[in-house]
Image (cartoon, grey):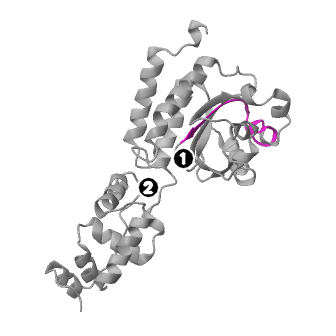
């Protein structure tokens, strides 16, 4: 391998700096994905990048996309990308399809490494999306976030007439994704994680009370519920957010509150008489 194809100290330093910037925005998937994509365009040297999060499904590892982000696309490119994700999705990309059968937690490839030029240039994914969007060369990286099949995907693109991605750039993206991938679902909120916005009204109210520091007894008083019903709601919240205790539930929500995506759920106004009982720690009979 030539010296020019090796990662440089500056490459590693800049990669870690970008990861740190993503961590600063980690409470909002839209924000940290945008910063990541913007930074990768400068780090690797590519005008466009698309990707997001998804999940491999079934023995054929068909991918279910539950988020899609982009950076560097013009208005026409964004329209083409939206149509591609709506009509075909990742399964319409021959490079992505070729990765279904690759083993390993992290795979980073250029198009010629997994798909022949003949298959690439006659594919629907290229003709209906890449070419129309102005892209010709791709550098694709997929990280397996969980053993259950959750994935993170990044696809850097260069236009027709530009050079393909070289081995150093491939190593750089692979290094970056390998270091950032383990943070998804931890320091970086995953777009697949549950949010409070779609909770049933009573669950949303119960969560709001818990976030304000109320005990289950106080929640019951404030909402006019029995203790047994309140406990059922709290248990349902545990299941919804995949936690086992109240401390885990609050930590799961509170570390995301400042991110913009997660707002403290609005609690309906509770009558003053009930609120007064709650302050005194008296449950409603």
Q: For this view, does 257 lie left or right of residue 104?
A: left
Front residue of 185 and 81: 185
Name the residue: 46% across, 42% down. 32
Residue 42 seen by the camera: no
Coordinates of residue 125 in the picture (x, y in percent): 78, 41
Name the residue: 23% across, 78% down. 217
**Residue 181 bears which disc, if any?**
none
Q: Which residue is mark 1?
A: 147
Q: For this view, does 136 lie left or right of residue 240?
A: right
Residues in magenta, as a range = 126-144
Coordinates of residue 163 in the picture (x, y in percent): 70, 19
Instruction: Categorize mark 1 by other alpha carbons within 10 Å: few (<14), some (14-19), many (20+).
Output: few
Task: State the SS at label 1.
Answer: loop
Coordinates of residue 16 in the picture (x, y in percent): 42, 27
Is residue 210 positioned above or below 24 on the image? below
Quarter occupied by residue 22: top left
Is residue 57 positioned above or below 196 on the image? above
Q: CA distance from mark 2 to mark 1?
A: 26 Å
**Residue 261 bears which disc, if any?**
2
Front residue of 237 and 214: 237
Badge count: 2
Name the residue: 45% across, 17% down. 10
* Residue 138 lies in the magenta-colored region: yes
- Quadrant for the N terminus, please: top right
């Amino acid at each position: 391998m030539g010296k020019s194809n090796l990662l440089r100290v500056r490459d590693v330093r800049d990669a870690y700096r970008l990861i740190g910037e993503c961590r600063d925005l980690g409470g909002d998937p839209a924000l940290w994905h945008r910063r990541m994509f913007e930074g990768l365009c400068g780090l690797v040297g590519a005008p466009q990048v698309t990707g997001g999060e998804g999940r491999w499904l079934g023995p054929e590892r068909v991918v279910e996309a539950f988020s899609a982000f982009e950076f560097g696309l013009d208005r026409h490119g964004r329209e083409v990308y939206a149509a591609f994700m709506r009509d075909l999705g990742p399964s319409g990309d021959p490079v992505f399809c070729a990765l279904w059968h690759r083993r390993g937690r992290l795979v980073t490839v250029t198009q010629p490494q997994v798909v022949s030029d003949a298959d690439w240039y006659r594919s629907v994914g290229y003709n209906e999306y890449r070419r129309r969007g102005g892209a010709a060369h791709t550098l694709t990286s997929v990280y397996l976030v969980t053993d259950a099949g959750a994935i993170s995907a990044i696809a850097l693109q260069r236009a027709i007439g530009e050079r393909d991605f070289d081995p150093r750039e491939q190593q750089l993206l692979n290094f970056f994704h390998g270091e950032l991938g383990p943070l998804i679902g931890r320091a970086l909120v995953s777009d697949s994680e549950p949010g409070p916005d779609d909770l049933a009204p009573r669950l949303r109210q119960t969560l709001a009370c818990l976030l304000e520091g109320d005990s289950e007894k106080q929640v019951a008083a404030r909402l006019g519920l029995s203790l047994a019903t309140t406990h059922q709601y709290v248990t349902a919240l545990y299941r919804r957010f995949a936690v086992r205790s109240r401390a885990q539930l609050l930590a799961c929500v509170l570390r995301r509150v400042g991110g913009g995506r997660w707002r403290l759920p609005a609690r309906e106004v509770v009558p003053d008489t009930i609120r007064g009982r709650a302050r005194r720690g008296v449950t409603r009979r």
